[in-house]
Amino acid sequence: MPSEVANGTPFNQKLHLTSRSAQSAIPKFTSAKQVNLIVRRKIGEATLVRKPSWPKFKFLGTGPKLKGDFPHLGFGWELDFYDFLHRWNGGVPLADSFKVKSWRGDDTVARVRHFYGISEDRSDERDLRNAVYFNWDSLPRAAIPIAAINIEEDEWDLCMLLTFRWGENFNRIFMIGNLHDCGPYNPDDLSRLQFVATSLPQFMKSLQPHEYYRYRTWFQLSIPANELQTVADAILDSGFEDYSGFEEIDDSRCAHASDPDTNISIWLSNSSSKIGNISAPAKIDRDSCILAIDAFRWQHPNTTKRIAEILKPLGLHRKLKKLGDTPTKSDSRRTK
């Protein structure tokens, strides 16, 4: 039976091995730099685990500096999250977005609201102990929550990131959604989980600013304002739904339609310098109209083709000129 390294024991001082061959195969580590390398390899019956290597990262609202271990939480220094807590102790990452599957199974974007930490107030919603206490009956065996997340336009009531303190998923990162939807759950049923990353450092390296995944593409539509209703009607006929102003675009400066199945938004404006509180590019011809698309990174190419196909029967597809991209300025993941 494989032995375990005692929680909180310095890496190069105590390794419990069950065979002489394993003991003789372990190298003598002489420098802290070596110990900080990411290495997990089996030598005989022992598993060596070295401290993780973290990417450069910026956080807001990190917790107080921590000292010592967390025996009451059931993990020690061999877990990546242990080192994370001692370095940052929770907080909100500036680069916060990553790609996941929605409850419907299509691609979408999740945002880290905050990583859990050990705060001075155990009732704080960002406190790890509080998160464990309130979600204990919903957590898989050996799992511990590490972060709260939001998913774009999704109906799951609560989503979290988990890591595992032992077992075959040790140190891996998973997402769990709709924690309080039903239950109790079988603690050994992992079908509710969505794999995210092989380790916490890898996950942090994958995080991107939100505008990397979702942004607005601006187009100049070289037609007079009195022709815009024809374009709006054609877009509605193609399957988009009127969110505001599309059916009577002459009565408003801008209009908004959306595709409920794909979370794509189309904006039309006769001459407005702002659409949805976002300024249009300064280089636009003020005698032309504006068309803008809000979508995820992977949706933009096909959506642009779809709009061009809608405009083609009207003879307007060649009058559509791309002006550039801007962030949509969504900040749905933030908490106080």
Image (spheres, rainbow, N blue to C red):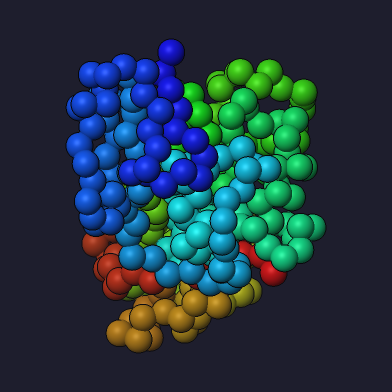
Q: Residue at x 50, y 29 (%)?
A: 166
Percent of width and height locating residue 157: 71, 43
Image spot of residue 14 (x, y percent): 40, 38
> Is residue 254 among the parts visible in the rendering?
no
The C terminus - image quarter:
bottom right
- Asked if 88 appears above or below 28 in the picture, the reply is below
Residue that appears at 27% across and 19% down: 20
Residue toward you, 88 or 322: 88
Residue 2's spot in the image, x, y percent? Answer: 41, 18
Q: How many marks?
A: 0
| Extreme-top residue of the structure | 1
Q: In this view, does 275 lie above or below 166?
A: below
Relative side of 95 to 254, left or right: left
Left or right of 332: which side holds 274?
A: left
Q: Which residue lies at the image location 63% right of the left edge and 43% below the top edge?
A: 71
Question: Residue visible at 70% across and 49% down?
Answer: 129
Residue 293 placement: quadrant? bottom left
Image height of 243 relative to 132, above or below: below
| Residue 113 or residue 236, whichever sits in front | 113
Can residue 42 be seen here? yes
Rendering coords of residue 265 (x, y %): 50, 56
Q: Is residue 324 left or right of residue 97?
A: left
Residue 277 or 240: which is nearer the viewer? Answer: 277
Quarter holding the N terminus is: top left
Give the quarter of the image for residue 197: top left
**174, above or below 32, in the image:** above
